[in-house]
Amino acid sequence: MTATLEIEKISPENTLEACARQVIVSYFREMMSYKEGAEDGTDIEFVHEMRVTSRRLRAAMDNFADCFPEKPFKKYYKKIKAITRTMGAVRDLDVLIARFQRELVILTEAEQADIRGLIEHLQQEREDARKPMLMLFAELEATDFETKFLEFFNSSHRTAR
Amino acid sequence: MAKVHTIIGVKPLGSYRENARIILPQKVEEVYTWEPFIHDETRQEELHNMRISIKRLRYTMEIFRAAYWLPKTGPKEVSLTHDERFAKLLAVIVDLQEILGDIHDCDVVLEVLTDYACQSECETSAQGVATLIDQTKEARKADYKVFLEKWEQLSTTNFKQKLLSFLAS
C-alpha cells in the first residue's frame, strides 16, 4: 500500500503525535522501497520516486518536529535531507538528458551532432553524480539506518519538547 | 533554496484535525511571501522559491487531507462535496507548482546550454545549442505569461481568502 493511501486512513481525532509517527513511518517505508531500483539505475523512475517521497517525508518532518525529542530528530532529518540532495543531483541530470533526447527530432543533422555531444557530457556527469548516492546508500546499510529510524519513529515520545 | 518557515503553535497532544488548522494557514502564508517578486520575470530565484513553498503547501495539504473529511454522522453527500472542494483547491496548488516547475526547468536548461556553448565555442559553431537556447527562451516566456495569467485570475477571484477560509473550517 502506498503511503498516501495509509495516510488517508488516519483518524483525525487521534493526537498529532500518534498521527505524525504514522505519516513519517509510511513515507519512510515507501521511500526505501525505491532504493534497490535507484541503486540499479536502469529505470530512471526509481530515483525520481525515491526523491519525491523523500521530499514528502521532509515536509512531514518539518510539520511534526515538535512531536519528537530535538537532538535525535535532527540527526534523522539531516540524513533524509542528504538522501534528497544526492538523489536530486542524479534526477536533475536524468531530466536534462531525457529533454535533450526528445528535442533531437526538431533539429537538423548538424545541430543534432552538437546536442549529442552535450548529452554524452551529461551522461558522464550522471555517472559521477551517482557515486555520492551509492556511497550514501552503503553508509545507510552499514549503520543500520533503516532499523534505527523505524525504531525511533515507531516509539512514543510524549514528553518530546 | 529558501529555508522552510518554522511552524509555530503546534500541539503534539492536540488532535490531528486541530493541528491541521494551525499548520496549513502558515504554509499558505509562506507561499505568499514570494508574491511581491512575481511580476518581474527575471527574479528566477524568487520564482523558484515560490515553487518550493507551493510544493511544501501541496505536500502538507496531502498529509492533512483526512483532517478535512466531515464526521461520519453527516449526510454522505455533504462529506463528498467537502472532499471535492478540498480536491479542487489542491488541484489549483498542483497546477501552480507545475507551471512554476516548467519555468524553472527552462532556467536550468538555459544555464546548461549557455555553459556548454561557452565551452564548445572554440571547437564547433554549436548551432544546435544556439537553436535550443532560442527555443527555450521562447518557451520560458510563454510559461511565465501563463503563470502570471493564472495568478492574476486567482487574485481576482480571491483565491487566498477562499483557501484560508476552507482550511480554517
Image: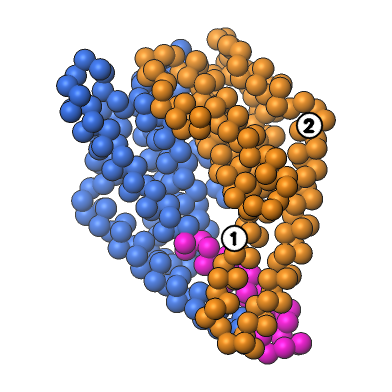
Given residues A1 and B108, the one toward you in this image is A1
Q: Which residue is mark 1?
A: A95
Report helix, strand or loop for mark 2. helix
Where's residue A75, x and y in %?
70, 28
The chain coloured orange in the image: A
Q: Which residue is mark 2?
A: A141
Q: Is residue B128 visible?
A: yes
Residue located 54% across and 20% down the image = A21
Q: Quadrant of residue A80?
A: top right
Q: Quadrant of residue B149?
A: bottom left
In this picture, is B44 found above or below B131? above
The chain coloured blue in the image: B
Q: Quadrant of the C terminus of chain B?
A: top left
Chain of the residue where label 1 is placed in the rendered structure: A
Where's residue A70, x and y in %?
63, 21
Where's residue A135, x and y in %?
80, 43
Residue located 37% across and 14% down the image = A13
**Amino acid marked by disc 2:** Glu
Count of numbered badges drawn on the protein: 2
Q: Which residues are magenta?
A: B102-126
In this picture, is A28 found above or below A121? above
Does the stretch in magenta take in B121? yes
Q: Chief secondary structure of the magenta span?
A: helix
Residue located 26% across and 18% down the image = B71
**Amino acid marked by disc 1:** Val
Furthest-right residue in this view? A142
Q: Is residue A126 left or right of residue B86?
A: right
